[in-house]
Amino acid sequence: MPPSTDPFYAGLGQAVRIGTEMLAALIVGGGLGWLVDTYLFASGPWGMVVGLVLGVTAGIRNAYRMAQQWK
Amino acid sequence: MENPLHPFELHQLVQLSLFGVDISLNKAVLMMWVVVGLAATLLVLGGASRRLVPTKLQSLAELLVEFIRGIIIDTMGQDGIRFFPLVATLFVFILFSNLLGLIPGSYTVTSQIAVTGAFALMVYGLSIVLGFLLHGVKFFGILIPPGTPGWLLPLMMPIELISQLARPISLAVRLFANMTAGHVILGVLFGLAITGGALIGWLPFAFTIAMNALEVGIAFIQAYIFTVLTCVYLGDAVHLHGHEAHAH
């Protein structure tokens, strides 16, 4: 499989992974917060705020963990 | 100019329904059959000869098998090889869908989030079921990263839960978005080439050719990434934190 051993394509593959990794965590965090707000407690915007913060944290952590594997 | 998302719309070609469930045929279903048929034919033919000095098709099939075997052993260790049939099927199907979708006039099955989402949920569901079967309640330990001080646990567990739940989403969205975006770009450039006419149209047309070459690379990369992450998630479920990789 030439393209996956080619350094250009290998780097491209890892670069496009970081974006989705962060985005997915953000979506899940915000979504869970929204679910808590809407169906569990009527806690206004706060569930989603906390969820988004946790989601961003999880996303950055995932990206950081990925980047550490490259060394 | 034509709507660049138009090629992704699916229309019923043959109306079918089974017990009230709509199972009509459309372009994506037909294309999936083509992918499965072609992949199965090539691999069965390649595996049929079994010569010591391989034929061209046989060496292609051997290269593919060795490549997938390498991915599994790198990410899951020797005992991960029992997942070979699943991982190889996923890789071959996604690779063939991505590559065949680049032929003008065909359809990219993996540009439908229903398809990639089904794969991602299957892989992630399998890893969860496997984890609980192998480790029982201890599998909840996947929410606690090794080396976390106790007072950080209330913060780390929600974060870890979110990054676990994000796995199937990022798996599905990555493949779907890359395939869709690549084809949208190709469509827009080709539309520009047609509107540009003979005077300037050759410029975007040259870009479509360059983009197509890049898309062939992306087709390989996305199939590769999906396969590697499948192995990583299954490996996490089997080994739980990786430290006791061969201990259990």
Image: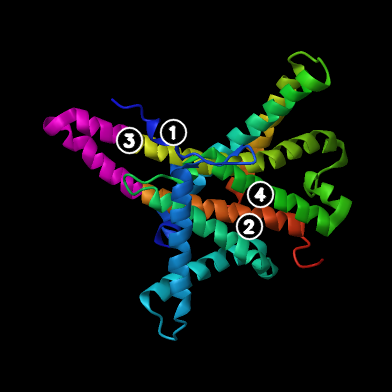
Question: Circle 4 sits on which residue?
Answer: B122
Assign a secondary structure to mark 3.
Answer: helix
Q: In this view, does A12 lie to the left or right of B230?
A: left
Assign a secondary structure to mark 2.
Answer: helix
Q: Which of marks 1 and 4 is nearer the N terminus?
A: 1
As measured in the structure, the alpha-carbon distance from the residue carrying label 1 to the one carrying label 4 is 25 Å
Tell me which residue sits at (69%, 27%) in the image: A31
Question: Circle 2 sits on which residue?
Answer: B231
* x then y, percent, for residue B231: 63, 57
As measured in the structure, the alpha-carbon distance from the residue carrying label 4 to the one carrying label 2 is 13 Å
Residue A11 visible in the shown view = no
Residue B54 visible in the shown view = yes
- Which amino acid, mark 4? Met
Tell me which residue sits at (49%, 45%) in the image: B110
Q: Which numbered dot is residue B187?
A: 3
Q: Is residue B200 left or right of residue B14?
A: left
Q: In this view, does B212 lie to the left or right of B96?
A: left
The answer to whether B154 is drawn above or below residue B67 in the figure is above
* x then y, percent, for residue A8: 40, 52
Assign a secondary structure to mark 4.
Answer: helix
In the rendered image, the residue lying farthest to the left is B199
| Letter of the chain that mark 2 sits on in the rendering | B
- Which amino acid, mark 3? Gly
Q: Which of marks 4 and 2 is nearer the N terminus?
A: 4
Question: Circle 1 sits on which residue?
Answer: B9
Q: Which quarter of the figure has residue B41?
A: bottom left
Q: Check whether the beta carbons of the residues at disc 1 and disc 4 lie within 8 A of each other.
A: no
* x then y, percent, for residue B22: 58, 38
- Which amino acid, mark 2? Cys
